[in-house]
Image: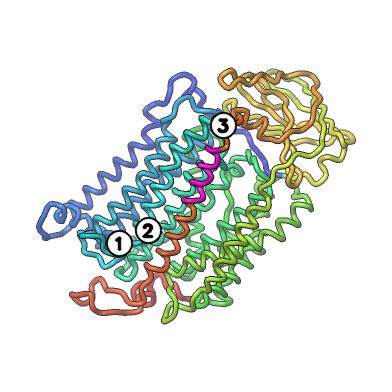
Amino acid sequence: MFEVFEGRSCVRTILADGWGYDAWAWLVVPIGIYCVCSLALFAFGRNDRPGFGNFFFGQISDSLRRLTGFPGWAMAGVLSGLLFLLILVIGFYWDVAWHIDNGRDVQLFTPSHTMILVGLGGLVYAAFLTMGFATLDKAKVGFKHGVANVPWSSVLLLALGFGGMAAFPLDNLWHQTYGIDVTLWSPTHLQLVGGGALGTLALFLMLAEALPSARPTAVGRGIFVLTGGTVLVAMSAVQAEFDYGVPQFQALYLPLLIMVAAGMGLVVARLALGPWGAVKVTLVYLGLRGFLALVVGGVFNHTVPRFPLYLASALAVEGAAALVGTRSRLRFGLAAGALVGTVGLVGELAWVRLSGWAPAPMPSSMAVKVLLLGPVAAIAAAVLGAGLGRAFVGDGGGGGEGMPVAALAGAGLALVAVLAYPLPRNVGSVDAVVRTEVVGSRAFVEVSLNPPDAVAGATAFAVTSWQGGGRVTAFFDQVGPGVYRSRKAVPVTGRWKTVVSLQRGSEVMATPVYLPADPSIGAEAVPLVPERRGPFVRNTTLLLREQHPGPAWPAMAAWSGVAACLAAWVGLMAVTAVRVRREEGPFVGGSAGGGRTTDWSTEVIGRSLAPHGR
């Protein structure tokens, strides 16, 4: 169903010259800009408190407060976290594109790997920085630990950074035991991606924790919207294999993952930012994903990642707010999820079809599953997003009605069930006769299938070449009963790996056309021949030839690590969402002792963000 389109890659950077200075600039330059901006904030700050710490960091805090209207401790953490998340996300999409276009790395600390590690470490740095600024500013947030004032959101950010970084040694153990695979959805890779992705939510919650003391300026409101947009980018990260066109799991996952990201990310944004908040963060998301596509496809010269739009889903969320309001978060979450799972789903499927991402119509067998499971995924995610919205709108008083714990538990279980349904990857009984017609370094591919109706109801059927310096896919035209010919020739020489892929429901299969020998992993060549007969096998048998069997305990350790981190992260996120919301909070610019109290949700940000407006 989903198209894999031709990509290009600077193979020379790994085969000949190694990584150049221009590659490392993507890590060094942002950090340099960060340092220059910090010195500028210091230079324009005002502070007369004694001590070097108060003098240097106090002036930075003062500049941030006057510039954004948010407390300096919060902006120091949020802006630092956003900078390191930018480094991380560029490194992530760069690394995925690299592996798709070129295969394995020849060294560990490539620029992309280093950017991911530095980005996760930057979350830890941002968390400690937030604590330091909050302590110097004597901010009334979080809790006291000795002399330190610790915001709840900084604890969450710290756990995400450390949890993501902990996946690196586990990842090394995984590869040593089972081979160096090229897949996104291994347990250690998911832990890495999860730590960084959820870091955006921690930063969004950090702004929620700061709101009682905030008087947002135009700049501060812009940063608030920007942070919400990064949440949507992060929640789309697990779709990357589909974005690049080499999914190793069922095609059904893509619409479901889009619904999860839209339901949760846009509902939280609407509750936090008020009217048109979902649309605003979607526009930010589109700008950021467009920038990433330009960098990866243009600057790095790799395959360009595609991405969903979320525009129909954003309008659906805004429509739900207009219809039922946001005071009852459960009612709003259910209504928003239902509209996202219908109107938003149709909009995303139309984009996938019209953009050429999926040039073939969706088979009826998959359409039924999408129409049944998509709304469930959207509603479950929207209810959970409405639960996180407590950090911004609170319960009772002026903040709206509370969210039943049973509803959140039910939504969580429903989401797990929906995402577990497409997990099996089976192999059907299909044999193929693969014939090739060589044209230079490429070949047209003809496939005769047994049984002849094997592609009936298929969600994907194409011949794909990858890891030879790019990626090329050709779809098939039927030329006879059970006989199909590729629409264009595909690469079949050198380092290219070329296979015919077939997906039918839970069956995810492939048969080889050409695979080069790989002595480093003991893999023999599958040479190009005029005709080859054989069965379809599980696609990872051919796509991940680096994998090999190993003892069970490393897998148990890796999956246990992911489960432990996820449980800790979800628990801390729930605690943070509950703790950061205050019905009464201090004013910045109020009485000297901060004693005046108010319903900050209407007075502090109502004139600009209005989180309770319909």
Range of the magenta residues? 553-564
Residue assigned mark 1: 68
Vertical placement of residue 342 versus 427, above or below: below
Mark 1 and mark 3: span between their CA atoms? 49 Å
Q: Which element is circle 2 on?
A: helix
Verify CB contact (< 8 Å) between mark 1 and mark 2: yes
Numbered mark located on residue 178 in the image: 3
Which residue is located at x 31 percent, y 58 percent?
75
Image point (37%, 32%), residue name: 24
Q: Where is residue 169 in the image (x, y as percent from the top left)?
A: 43, 37
For residue 122, above or below residue 542: below
Image location of residue 194, percent across then percent down: 48, 49
Residues tagged 2 and 3 counted as in contact (Cβ below 8 A): no
Q: For numbered disc 3, what is the local secondary structure? A: helix
In the rendered image, is residue 354 in sight?
no
Give me the residue at 73% from left, 25% from top. 513
